[in-house]
Amino acid sequence: MKNVLALALISCAVVWWTATGSGTSFASPPYPVLSNTALPAQVLLVKKNPASGQITAPRTVKSIRHHAHKNYTRVVLDLTGRVAVKKTKNSRKETISLANVRLSKRAQQRIKGKNFPRAISIIPGDAETVHIVLDLQALRTYRILTLDNPDRVAVDLFYGKKTAPAKSKPRTTKPAEAVQRDDAPVSPAPPSGSTTHAGVLVIIDPGHGGRDPGTTGRTGAKEKAIVLQISKYLRDLIRKRHEAEVLLTRTKDVFLDLEKRVGFANTKKQEWCGKDMGSNVDATKKSRTCLFISIHVNSHPQRSIHGLEMYHFGKANDPRALEVAARENGMKLENDSPAWQFIITDTLTDRKLQESRTFAKTANDTIIATLRKHYTIKNHGVKTAPFYVLRFTNMPSILAEVGFISNSTEEKRLKTKAFQQKLAEGIYQGIQAYLKNM
């Protein structure tokens, strides 16, 4: 009885204590309150985003690079994270302001270079803001792109005809390629049948990753690592040589399920090329092209099998093609009936099928021709199979199986930098050939 009475008294005391505000609630322990001056230096640098209420550290422009393509000059700001972009414009200039951003020393040195492009200035402002200022009187038009994976802002400068040198002007003694290489005046955009393609987005999908190694060779070589390296070589080739934007679904050893790969590709395609492949496309995006290529390494129970094969979407040509698609889709054939039927019977547009077929044939022929200059390669040709990433991406899509890791000779090749770079070269040439014949 005494214990019950004691517990009742304690309970009453707690209720009274809390109600009068004389105590601290159990949900809010009496932790010490720190002032701003008590915070560590690195915390004081953190700012609050008023729009989202989240704490975000200042971003940094790591580097600034520029390159004069045939029809425009591209200036790229490489960032350490996503940034908020604000635009202001008048008749003479447009200012793109990047909030909560700093310029690194390397970036500052770059914009002071004598070959930095005309008609654009990059200026650090107050309160950790960087301003990109465009001289509209010196430009015919321009394009601003906010890109991720990795995060960057790209500005494409299309100079007006008035900036081009007159044809009657005598040549200087300086070699043409050495004159204003990073700031060469450009001509108007070519017609759609031209071999230059400034409005092209290539999405590269390195298969597998993270907890999914893909197929593994006898010496331990993993598909996920090989295809990622090939994809990076291909990305670098496209950026260096071609007037195209290029993105990877993954840039490191992380797991991505098929839905995320497809979702990433379709989101970027919609941003770049419009909502669909039909006529209902924004006028500014109608002339652009989006391509998807998934890169994988093959395997076979018979270790003597070797070579390359290229796929586009369709019903499997043969049981072997169905096995390959099942493996890459992460499915078991004995349990596949409903899923496979769904993929096959859900119809696609004739346009995507035709373009994917042409893309696959062109890429396959070019890769084989490129590799046969250096290696003995068996061509298994172009096949069809119901790959998930080929079915659900909304653009011309192909999947390359670039060798059999189950074959000892090809496993050794696939691990070498030389062979990986030659594969990337072949795929790049295939993309070029496809775009040229569009």
Image (cartoon, rainbow, N blue to C red):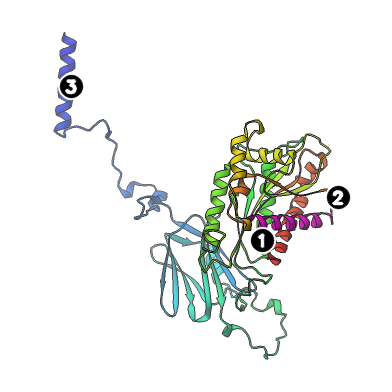
| Residue at which label 3 appears | 11
Q: Nearer the viewer, residue 194 or 217?
A: 194
Q: CA distance from mark 2 to mark 1?
A: 26 Å
In magenta, the rendered stretch is: 352-376
Compared to 56, does 161 lie above or below? below
| Residue at which label 2 appears | 376
Q: Is residue 283 left or right of residue 228?
A: left
Residue 97 visible in the displayed image: yes
What x and y, as percent, mark residue 347?
Answer: 59, 49
Residue 291 visible in the displayed image: no
Q: Which of disc 3 and disc 2 is earlier in sequence?
A: 3
Classified by dominant secondary structure, the portion drawn in magenta counts as helix
Q: Amino acid at mark 1?
A: Ile
| Residue at which label 1 appears | 238
Q: Secondary structure at mark 1?
A: helix
Compared to 155, does 139 lie above or below? below
Q: CA distance from mark 2 to mark 3?
A: 86 Å
Q: Secondary structure at mark 2?
A: loop
Q: Is residue 374 magenta?
A: yes
Q: Amino acid at mark 2?
A: Thr
Q: Which of disc 1 and disc 3 is earlier in sequence?
A: 3
Compared to 401, does 150 lie above or below? below
